[in-house]
Image: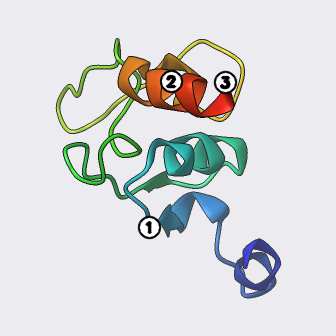
Amino acid sequence: MIEVVEAMGWPTRRMIRHGGHQMSLNTAAGLHSGGNESYPDVFKPFGGFADDIRVENGRVGLPQIPGVGFEAKSELYAIMRDLAV
């Protein structure tokens, strides 16, 4: 998709990713797109943002941790931990 958009002369910053899970936020940042659609209270425990992330003026920052973004969600982490045992 990125190659097609760039070939058409569009900047990747004009791309807005779709997806309500937190990984979409991290991939949008990694691919330098313009953002992503999010619905933080849907698809729990996968949906939403890291526990310490706050929505301010319709925007959020990235968690300052390594990984795809699930690691700072305590509710999801607890479920994954239990599944791994």
From the image, tell me which residue sits under label 2: 77
Kind of element beneath mark 3: loop
Residue 21: % across, % down:
43, 50
Residue 52: % across, % down:
34, 12
Kind of element beneath mark 1: loop
Q: What residue type is labelled 1?
A: His
Q: Could you tell which of marks 2 and 3 lies nearer the N-terminus? A: 2
Q: Is residue 48 left or right of residue 76?
A: left
Q: Which amino acid does label 2 sit on?
A: Tyr
Tell me what residue is drawn at x 34 percent, y 19 percent: 53
Q: Could you tell which of marks 3 and 1 lies nearer the N-terminus? A: 1
From the image, tell me which residue sits under label 3: 85
Q: Is residue 4 left or right of residue 19?
A: right
Above or below 49: residue 20: below
Q: How crowded is mark 1: few (under 14 residues within 10 Å), some or many (20 or more)?
A: few
Residue 57: % across, % down:
17, 32
Tell me what residue is drawn at x 36 percent, y 24 percent: 75
Q: Is residue 48 left or right of residue 66?
A: left
Q: What residue type is labelled 3?
A: Val
Near-viewer residue (18 or 71): 71
From the image, tell me which residue sits under label 1: 18
Location of the N terminus by quadrant is bottom right
Which label was assigned to residue 78? none
Location of the C terminus by quadrant is top right
Colour basis: rainbow
Near-viewer residue (36 or 22): 22
Residue 41: quarter of image: top left
